[in-house]
Image (cartoon, rainbow, N blue to C red):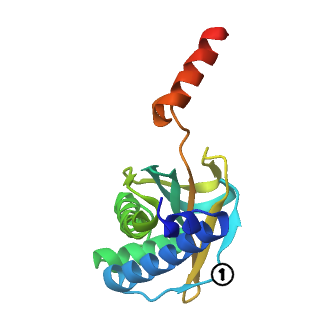
Amino acid sequence: MMPSQEHATGAVGLRALIADAIRQSTGEVFSTMVGLEVEGGKEYTGGAGFGATDGLLAFIGLAGSFMGTGTVSCNARLACRISSQFLMTELEAVDSEVLDAVGEITNMILGNVKSALENELGPLCLSVPTVVYGKNFEARALQNGECVVVPFASGEDRFEVSLGLRRPMLRANDFPIEERFVLASARRRR
């Protein structure tokens, strides 16, 4: 393991690395693809869930040297606004075009975050985005940890981008041969 990897994967170093990657990626995607400027606020750590909310929640799973879930959440008005800008057509209500556009924007943001983090954390893969729209719903990622949440503002509108990562569970084959022998012996004794 390289020294930078050790530092970055410590709790504080990993949080700062994720927050910086989210701010950079979100700013770039909104500026170049959506045509809106956004301002990132102070990151905070949250649990792996979202309380009762109204609007859209787009999420993407990550797997590899770390695993977890990344999200973009916003209200319906902002979803229509960014989708209209992105697709260069007027969209006034959440429909399949808005859901697809928000999913694609989420994919671009978290894809850029993934690329930025791989230099420090190792290879990562993304799932396809899923977008949920509704009123008074809760969501929870089963990742046993906290996630880094960065709030953003674009004019009067607010939205959040979050990412929670943890190391995957080790399998027996991930251990050196001597430790695998000890693990196998312990299983036989049960």
* Quarter of the figure that contains the C terminus: top right
Q: Nearer the viewer, residue 165 or 87?
A: 165
- Residue 69 drawn above or below residue 158: above
Residue depicted at x 50% and y 64%: 5
At 47% across and 36% down in the image, what residue appears?
174
Q: Label 1 belongs to which residue?
A: 42
Is residue 90 something that shows in the picture?
no
Residue 139 drawn at (x, y percent): 62, 50
The structure residue drawn at horizontal position 55% and vertical position 18%, both measured from the top left corner, is: 184
Residue furthest left in the image: 88
Residue 22 percent coordinates (x, y): 50, 73
Which residue is located at x 41 percent, y 70 percent?
A: 116
Secondary element at image label 1: loop
Check disc 1: other Cα within 10 Å, few if <14, some if 14-19, many if 20+. Answer: few
Q: Residue furthest front?
A: 178
Residue 38 at what x, y percent from top left?
49, 86
Q: Where is 180 relative to 40, above or below?
A: above
Q: Nearer the viewer, residue 78 or 71?
A: 71
Q: Mark 1 belongs to which amino acid?
A: Lys
For the residue pair 43 and 119, the one nearer the viewer reads as 119
Number of marks in picture: 1
Q: In the image, is residue 141 above or below residue 109?
A: above
Side of 129 where 172 appears, left or right = right
**Residue 108 placement: quadrant:** bottom left
Asked if one can make out residue 185 in the rendered structure from this viewpoint, the answer is yes
Splitting the image into 4 quarters, where does residue 44 fall? bottom right
Residue closer to the observer: 102 or 15: 15
